[in-house]
Image (spheres, rainbow, N blue to C red):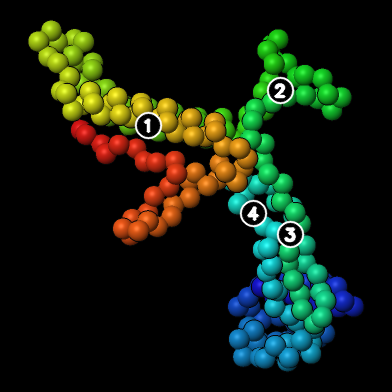
């Protein structure tokens, strides 16, 4: 991204790949690729340098709006200090700190742990749904039994679901929660994550 700097302030953003008029002069689109940094700077045009030092994963953090500043002949876009999202559930309150109720029931602002555990439950439900028909058939057909490998698989899905939820509940902070989902390469060349994986499907 390129911008125009006038009086040490960014005043315009240019659409890359399009020509433009500046101070009654028409400039072609290829100015951004053919002109040197110094030549562009001479007419007040600078490429924006993006500094993501403070920017964090928006799934786990609330980032500030970015700001663009001109200093030392360089335009930099940067972010302020990110704030970790709420980890635990809490009661919803109004601006005066009073609990917010709906139809007499306390409203809850759900934290990341609840959101992640809800996703685990949804995934487990989706996996189990694929073999539900075995269970339905066994309930409706007297001489039919669910195959042993299906029973074992379904039990394994539930066990892993519980293990994942326990790991999520055990996260001490947002970074610890995030780490559960991060894959790292092992000595054998495989990639694993602390949260673990679902059992291999059996259909």
Residue at the image position 65 percent from the left and 87 percent from the top: 31
Spot occupied by residue 175 in the image (x, y as percentages of width and height): 60, 46
Q: CA gap, disc 4 to disc 3? A: 10 Å
Earlier sequence position, callout 3 versus callout 1 = 3
Q: Earlier in the sequence, mark 3 or mark 2?
A: 3
Where is residue 11? Give x, y as percent. Answer: 82, 71
For residue 134, side relative to residue 15 (left or right): left
Left or right placement of residue 195 versus residue 65 in this view: left
**Within 10 Å of the Cα at label 1, are there few (<14), some (14-19), or many (20+) other Cα atoms?**
some
Foreground pick, 34 / 37 = 37
Going 82% across and 80% down the picture, which residue do you hit? Answer: 72
Q: What is the CA distance from the residue labelled 2 to the residue labelled 4?
A: 26 Å
Indicate the quadrant where residue 38 lies.
Answer: bottom right
Location of residue 109 by image quarter: top right
Lower sequence index among marks 1 and 2 = 2
Q: Secondary structure at mark 2?
A: strand
Q: In this orientation, which residue lies closer to the viewer: 174 or 36? A: 174
Where is mark 3, residue-wise?
79
Q: Tag 1, which secondary structure?
A: helix
Furthest residue to the right? 7
Residue 202: x, y in percent? 22, 34
The quadrant holding residue 5 is bottom right
Tell me the residue at 72%/46% (across/down): 83
Asked if labels 4 and 1 touch by Cβ distance under 8 angstroms, the answer is no
| Residue named by callout 1 | 160
């Amino acid at each position: 991204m390129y911008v125009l700097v006038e009086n040490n302030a960014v005043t315009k953003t240019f659409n890359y790949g399009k020509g433009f008029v500046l101070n009654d002069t028409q400039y072609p689109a290829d100015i951004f690729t053919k002109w040197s940094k110094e030549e562009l700077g001479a007419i007040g045009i600078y490429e924006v340098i993006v500094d993501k030092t403070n920017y964090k994963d928006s799934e786990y953090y609330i980032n500030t709006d970015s700001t663009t500043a001109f200093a030392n002949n360089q335009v930099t876009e940067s972010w302020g200090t990110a704030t970790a999202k709420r980890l635990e559930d809490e009661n919803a309150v109004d601006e005066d700190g009073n609990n917010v109720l709906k139809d007499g029931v306390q409203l809850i602002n759900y934290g990341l742990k609840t959101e992640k555990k809800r996703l685990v439950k949804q995934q487990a439900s989706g996996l189990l749904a694929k073999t539900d028909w075995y269970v339905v058939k066994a309930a409706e057909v007297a001489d039919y039994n669910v195959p042993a490998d299906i029973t074992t698989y379904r039990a394994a899905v539930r066990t892993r679901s519980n293990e994942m939820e326990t790991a999520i509940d055990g996260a001490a902070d947002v970074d610890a929660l995030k780490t559960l989902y991060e894959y790292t390469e092992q000595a054998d060349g495989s990639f694993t994550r602390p949260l673990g994986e679902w059992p291999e499907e059996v259909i």
